[in-house]
Image (cartoon, rainbow, N blue to C red):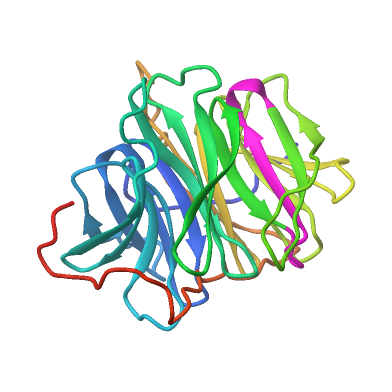
Amino acid sequence: MSTPAYTTRPDRLELGEGVRWTGQEVVLVDLLLGRLLKALEDPAAPLEPLAQLPFPIGAVAPVAGRPGTWIAAADTGVCLLTPGATTWLARPEDGATRRMRMNDAVADPSGRFWAGSMGYDADEDAGSLYRVDHDGTVVRVLDGITIPNGPAFTPDGKGMYLADTARGVIRRHPVDPDTGALGTPEVFASVDDGSPDGMTVDSEGALWAAVWGTGTVRRYLADGTPDRVLRLPASRPAGVCLEHDVLHITTARLGLADPRPEDGAVFSVRVDVPGTPTPAFRLHDTATVPPLLPGEPA
């Protein structure tokens, strides 16, 4: 276990999640407060607000060919965001027997968007995983998950890692890149001293995972072998991404009775294996998606 020299940004987030490098910028969310934020190149600069929503937002991906447009896992479904406009693709968790919200999400190398849902009270088995196809259709592909985190994809798009955080397990699912169909999963890693949260895959195919409750980020080789552990001065790391060879880590103050000064901070540290940008969501021109209209109700 190592404690390298981190750069720490001045902001403190309630629940920092969904950190992504798009190739042009690093974005992240303060999930329960509905804030979409941008991390400027100057690590001493405050995070720049991109959107303030009246509901939780779990994570976003850029939409290819639509500058300034994001696809977001938010509130009870999936929507497209531009400044001042929200267009819902679907709200699959509306009307659930439990109070639900969306959680982590990411686009895969084929340009589909994958988003998890969970109960506000982390109700056992209440969560699901949804796939958004190129035509804008939102499909439930997995259920019976308590707190889905990730997913994270291998560089070739043929493997998906998904954490069931409450159960302390990360599973690896085969993926058909042409159709988005999932194969039979296998347990990739189990965590017995904390809860696996946000994840990313580097250029060597190794998985980096934030482990909530332990103050650590862990790297696993592609065969599941634990490789290294980074120690943070914050107990609840929640999200990770790689911007070239810089690992960005979000953390949370949520639920801490006596948070330490760096709980909720965004950390950055250089590592020896780079990553690649998060893919964009690719929405086909023929998709039957309503136009983005300023002032459309959220």
Which image quadrant for residue 243? bottom right
Q: Is residue 149 above or below residue 292?
A: above
Q: Nearer the viewer, residue 104 or 18?
A: 104
Where residue 220 appears, as percent x and y from the top left, is 80, 44
Q: Quadrant of residue 246?
A: bottom right
Q: Nearer the viewer, residue 296 or 248?
A: 296
Residue 194 visible here: yes
Residue, x 46% and y 50% (percent of image)? 18
* Tag count: 0
- Indicate left or right for 126 with 297 as reference: right
Image quarter hosting the N terminus = top right
The reply to whether the magenta stretch includes residue 124 is: no
> Please, is residue 193 above or below residue 51 in the view?
above
Vertical side of 63 occupied by 20: above or below: above
Is residue 199 visible in the rendered structure shown here? no
Q: Is residue 101 above or below residue 241?
A: above
Q: Nearer the viewer, residue 80 or 243?
A: 80
Residue 21 placement (x, y as % from top left): 51, 66
Residue ID at (41%, 40%): 102
Over which residues does the magenta segment extend?
154-168
Return the x and y of residue 175 as percentages of the image width and height.
Answer: 75, 55
Q: Nearer the viewer, residue 182 or 146?
A: 182
Answer whether residue 157 is magenta in the image: yes
Where, by quadrant of the figure, is residue 203 drawn? Answer: bottom right
Question: Does residue 38 appear left or right of residue 138 in this picture?
Answer: left
Residue 272, position as x, y percentages in the image: 75, 63
Residue furthest left in the image: 295
Please give the name of the residue rendered at 31% of the width and 76% of the height, measured from the top-left corner: 68
Determine the residue positioned at 74% across, 37% down: 171
